[in-house]
Amino acid sequence: MRQQQSAAVEYRRSDPMQKSNDSQDVVLKVENLHKKFCLHLRRSMAYGVIDTARSMVGMRNNGQKLRPGEFWALNDISLELRRGETLGIMGENGSGKTTLLRLISGIFAPDSGRITVKGRVGALIAVGAGFHPHMTGRENIYLNGTILGMTREEITRRFDDIVDFAEIGGFIDAPVTTYSSGMYVRLGFAIAIHCNPDIIIADEILSVGDYMFQMKCFKRLLEILETGCTVILVSHSEIAMRSVCKKGAIMDAGKLIDVGKIDDMILKYRSLLINRKFGKEQSSIFSPKVGVSTTGGARIYNIEVRDKNGDLIRQNNRELKKLNYSKNSQLSVVFDVEILQEIHNPRVGLYIRDMTKAELTYVCAAVVSKDNFNGRLTLLRGKRRFGFEIDISNLTPNVYTIMTGIADEQYHIKVYDCLDETDRITFEILNSDELVECDALLNRPYYLPKYKFNMEELG
Amino acid sequence: MKKEHTGSAKTYPIAVYEPDSRRNIGFLKIWMIMLTNMMRSRELVFVLFKRDFFAGYRKSFLGITWIFISPVLGIVSWVFMNATGILNPGDVGIPYPAYILIGSSVWGLFMGFYGAAEGTLGAGGGFIMQIKYPHEALLIKQIGLHLANFSIGFILNIAILLVFGVVPSWKIIFFPVLILPLLFLGTGLGLVISVISVVAGEIRTVIGMGLGFLIYITPVIYSSNFDNPLLQSLIKWNPLTYLITAVRDSIIYGRIDHFDRFILSSALAFAIFLFSWKLFYVSEEKVIEKMI
């Protein structure tokens, strides 16, 4: 089989026309896949005994039904990949990503459903599998390479590339136990990535080694993609996902929630996480503050966010609309505050952050009298509405959080009231045709945008 | 891996993974699949064998010399017992020390086959959950390791016999053939236990103790010339009696007593082997996920 597989690789390389024909070719088909696991160790073993005994005497196991203590690690997954397609799978820890990869690799058997794989699968999951610590780097390359399915001759042919890639240099004839953990992992990864499989399954590959090595792995993966290889990538790195994958899939609690264009899926996954983090429902509109101490001298009780056309996109905890990415979009944020005690020389501000909590946009206005711009003003008790119109052209498709606050001139230490992340005043910018790739990967600096501010008294 | 047929569209191998798909494969087909898997994974068997056989000694000063030292140390105890006369309980009409030495060596061979097969899945070396490869390769590697260790000890044993003036029969050349039934029986039992013990660890201990007990109802450390009728019949119905004595006696005396029973026992061993091999193949895929 191995010879046949390598023949397949050569065959594909030598006939470029074949590639275009093959691009219509389904190389991976997952149909109604189910896999169940048991959380209790002893019970799991008992089920194991039963299942083993049943299969030994030739009885069928009922894969469709959960027994007590079992749960669906994979629940009705269906998926199809064509040759040359690249799929990024996102999902929280425990959502079933690795289990799915193991089933596709054929390590675990499905409980029901079916997987059809066409071509040699190379798993970048087990880096350094089977390494013997007392054997040299050279010997371990042959050992691990063979375990990964390469023939001796293939390994010899790629040996120098592997050593170069791993940057092991003179240490190649030293036992791997003397390697630093970084060298060890680099060597393991170098072997794995030189296997030249038809389908690459990569689980968090970008967490290997230092930054430079990660970039190198990345580059190598992109090179492999050029050859028409099919890739399934599991990663928490959106940059990795965006640059490698065209398709995205979201998994949650063993289910495949959605499959689609990678950019759409990344955003969808983000909103899923945000909704989960902050909960769907909230008893009071705004939660008590954590981290920021507020004096309680004011109370923000209403906030409205509108787009350039004045359409309401969020009111308090209700999201009404999503924005589409545009190169010059504006956001209007209006919030109503009940002033409970007099505030001298008030400041009103607003931050926009992304989910990494990077502050991307910040505006702060001193509230001054219309008649006397230099004069000091005291806000008397009563209700006020503050409004900002902000240029948000630096924001690319993502989910953002708005934080607002009211303070006096010592605003960095004394805040009367504020809305922070826990209040989840979020808005989402969706992908649009205006977005070009360089925008998506743009590093957006901390930004003081153009803005307009106004205040009005409320009855 | 369930059904694995190669070919059809283009030259890409196609693998189909389905629940219980190994269940439906015919008896002979399973054999073919497993034999092909073994042939294909011979490079894997070789590197794993090399790793386990040699790399273990890397960190010792004497290195691979230990491969020879260990059996020598084993023989020392025999030489001591022989010298003190413990092994010469009067006239039994045979070269008794040789009888014990070769007999226990053959018994060790059988137990080693069992142990090797029983450790098949456990020898997955940490990557059984990470990489897909035919696990049959592990069995071959295990047996290879055992045979390598055994042969060194065995050659030393024969050498020591020569030193003590016992010349083995020329029929020793049949040794590789005569041990086959022991291989079939040992690996047959071991393979099934290898799967079961993943989900029921106690089985390994229980069977291990049970097999250890078998040595008392097999004429290995004593000759079968005694009167206890119960023991007599136990020995008589124990297939190991014929499988082990055939190997030993062909070396020491150049003859096989009860050749018919030996053939019968061999057939039984082979049947057990065939059967357990199938059991292993259909059930091992169920337990891989439990190997945590």
Image (cartoon, coloured by chain):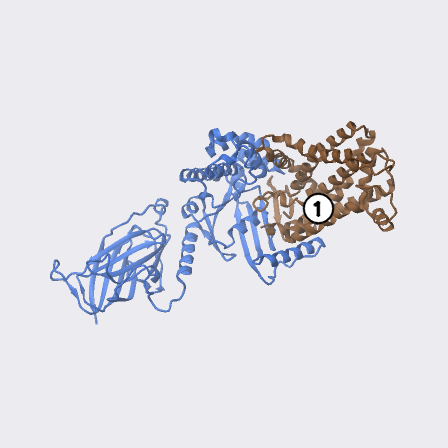
- The answer to whether one can see residue A75 in this image is no
Q: How crowded is mark 1: few (under 14 residues within 10 Å), some or many (20 or more)?
A: many
The picture places residue B282, in percent across and down from the top left corner, at: 68, 50
Quadrant location of the C terminus of chain A in the rendered image: bottom left
Give left or right: position of A395 versus B96: left
Q: Residue furthest front?
A: B84
Q: Quadrant of residue B4?
A: top right
Number of numbered discs overlaid on the protein picture: 1
Give left or right: position of A457 versus A78: left
Give left or right: position of A310 versus B237: left
Q: In this view, does B199 lie above or below B265?
A: below
Give left or right: position of A459 versus B17: left
Chain hosting mark 1: B
Q: In which quarter of the image is residue A370?
A: bottom left
Q: The blue chain is which one?
A: A
- The answer to whether one can see residue A199 in this image is yes
Q: Is residue B82 above or below residue A113?
A: above
Asked whether A21 or B82 is in front, the reply is B82
The picture places residue A74, in percent across and down from the top left corner, at: 55, 56
Asked whether B230 or A183 is in front, the reply is B230
Quadrant location of the N terminus of chain A in the rendered image: top right
- Assign a secondary structure to mark 1: helix
Q: Name the residue under label 1.
A: B190
The picture places residue B60, in percent across and down from the top left corner, at: 58, 33
The picture places residue A27, in percent across and down from the top left corner, at: 55, 45
Residue at 46% across, 54% down: A92
Which tint is chain B?
brown
The amino acid pointed to by label 1 is Gly
Q: Is residue B279 above or below residue A71?
A: above
